[in-house]
Image: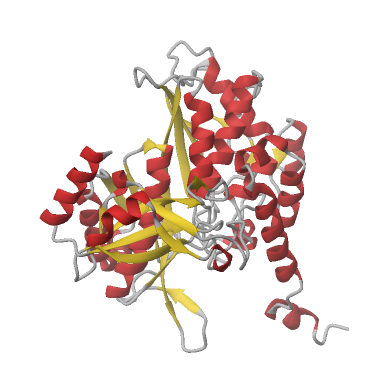
């Protein structure tokens, strides 16, 4: 630790860092922070930056509780390139009375990762953040950020003219992240107007969760320079494709780094090992409860809809499967096999807390390995073209269609609840209140539909 600290101290000096942002997350995955002078490095490493836990959602404290201390992880040193003053961010773990706080999302993920490590396994993950750049109208409504007035196509995905106005933003974001060693390898205009995606190299799950959290911070701050608001809301526009946080994953041998999901002799021809199939079996068995964590908001379920979704996307597709299924290289499945030993879950929402989402996901997969759960044969063909009756007849379950339905599944799934640890009850309570608040609202659609209907 001392050697690492001195290396970080030298980097802080070389980079001209004057202030440190001690960053953690609440139960929703929203970035929270305290700022301290760089001279306080030892304090926030050994003791932490203190705060009142009752002021933060879902950390298991009230106004009477002892202070929570956010202790930085020195390996997460991240200069904030967009700040004029030399400032760096460190992700942190939460402690109370000098003990790890179990209500910390990051600490909880480390707990579940240790369960994999005890089996000699590392959970490697790449997450693909999709997001919108929007502007606010004087009446409070929003519109896609469209400074040149050209991003109007029904199918704008990969369109150069639509992407060109965002090149400056995307290039600055890419340069910033690559200076940190993230290995950004592509950026593109996504399926909706004003929607973008930036892809970076996979890493172990904890590193990836830290990076996704920072990515949301970075996009929010850099977008301001371009007159835009960056939003990771799952579906800000009813008639456009929603934003996902697709999870690419495999397990690796901790000693050798070898991908243990890979088997080139796979009888199904997907290049997956028996262990990989068992992992998928666990994810699919627990999928209906799992989405309560990976699609955690009321709004997420506007994206996670059954069928082709023609009414909810100008492009003709939502690109979001709502079936607990897996298949070959096929984007109509919950889990597609993107190559030998390479799986992708396409249902995960941009609004997901990556620490909680990955902890729950890994818990489900490990249950599949422990109990040798068979996911059944791979599904092929276009599920969007199949009727719901046909899909049901094939034994494929539908994913919950609203947050309340998903929470009911979570309440009765001990494996996914176990992935959340002591956070499970807090999470269910907060999310149940969120649903109840939403359910009591009278929407403009209701007024338009029913005001003079009778």
Residue appearing at x 28%, y 47% in the figure: 186
Residue 118 x %, y %:
50, 22
Residue at 39% across, 55% down = 48
Q: On screen, 279 above or below 182?
A: above
Q: Position of residue 230 (x, y in %)?
A: 40, 67
Residue closest to the eye, 305 or 121: 121
The foreground one among 422 and 248 is 422
Q: Going by the image, does 345 lie left or right of 15? A: right
Does residue 454 sit above or below 327 in this rendering? below
- Between 319 and 354, the residue placed more toward the observer is 354
**Horizontally, is 68 left or right of 253 in the view?**
right
Residue, x 22% and y 65% (percent of image)? 168
Side of 221 where 326 appears, left or right: right
In the image, taking residue 22 as reference, residue 105 lies left or right, namely right
Where is the C terminus found, in terms of image quarters? bottom right
Which image quarter is the N terminus in? Answer: top left
Q: Do we see residue 366 in this rendering?
A: yes
Residue 385 visible somewhere in the drawing: no
Q: Is residue 179 above or below residue 380?
A: below
- Closer to the camera, 210 or 106? 106
């Amino acid at each position: 630790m001392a050697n690492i600290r001195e290396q970080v101290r030298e980097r802080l000096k070389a980079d001209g860092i004057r202030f440190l942002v001690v960053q953690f997350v609440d139960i929703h995955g929203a970035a929270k922070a305290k700022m301290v002078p760089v001279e306080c490095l030892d304090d926030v490493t050994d003791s932490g930056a203190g705060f009142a836990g009752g002021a933060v959602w879902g950390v298991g404290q009230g106004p009477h509780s002892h202070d929570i201390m956010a202790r930085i992880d020195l390996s997460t040193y991240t200069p904030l390139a967009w700040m004029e003053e030399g400032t760096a961010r460190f992700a942190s773990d939460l402690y109370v009375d000098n003990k790890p706080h179990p209500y910390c999302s990051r600490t909880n993920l480390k707990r579940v990762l240790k369960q994999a490590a005890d089996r000699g396994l590392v959970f490697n993950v790449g997450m693909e953040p999709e997001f919108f750049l929007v502007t606010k109208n004087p009446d409070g409504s929003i519109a896609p950020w469209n400074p040149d007035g050209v991003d109007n196509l029904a199918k704008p995905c990969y369109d150069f003219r639509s992407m060109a106005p965002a090149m400056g933003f995307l290039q600055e974001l890419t340069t910033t992240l690559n200076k940190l060693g993230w290995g950004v390898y592509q950026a593109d205009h996504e399926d909706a107007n004003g929607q973008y995606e930036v892809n970076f190299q996979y890493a172990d799950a904890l590193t990836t969760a830290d990076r996704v959290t920072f990515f949301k911070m970075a996009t929010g701050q850099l977008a301001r320079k371009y007159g835009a608001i960056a939003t990771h809301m799952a579906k800000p526009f009813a008639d456009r494709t929603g934003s996902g946080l697709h999870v690419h994953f495999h397990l690796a041998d901790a000693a050798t780094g070898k991908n243990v999901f890979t088997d080139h002799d796979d009888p199904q021809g997907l290049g997956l090992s028996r262990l990989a199939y068992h992992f998928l079996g666990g994810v699919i068995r627990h999928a209906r409860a799992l989405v309560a964590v990976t699609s955690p908001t009321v709004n997420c379920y506007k994206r996670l809809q059954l069928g082709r979704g023609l009414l909810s996307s100008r492009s003709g597709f939502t690109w979001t499967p709502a079936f607990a299924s897996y298949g070959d290289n096929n984007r109509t499945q919950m889990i597609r096999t993107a190559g030998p030993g390479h799986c992708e879950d396409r249902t995960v929402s941009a609004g997901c807390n990556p620490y909680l989402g990955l902890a729950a996901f890994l818990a489900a997969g490990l249950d599949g390995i422990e109990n040798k759960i068979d996911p059944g044969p791979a599904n092929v063909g276009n599920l969007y073209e199949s009727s719901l009756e046909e899909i049901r007849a094939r034994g494929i379950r539908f994913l919950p269609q609203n947050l309340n339905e998903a929470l009911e599944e979570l309440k009765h799934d001990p494996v996914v609840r176990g992935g959340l640890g002591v956070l499970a009850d807090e999470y269910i309570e907060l999310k149940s209140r969120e649903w109840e608040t939403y359910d009591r609202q009278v929407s403009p659609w209701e007024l338009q539909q029913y005001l003079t209907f009778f």
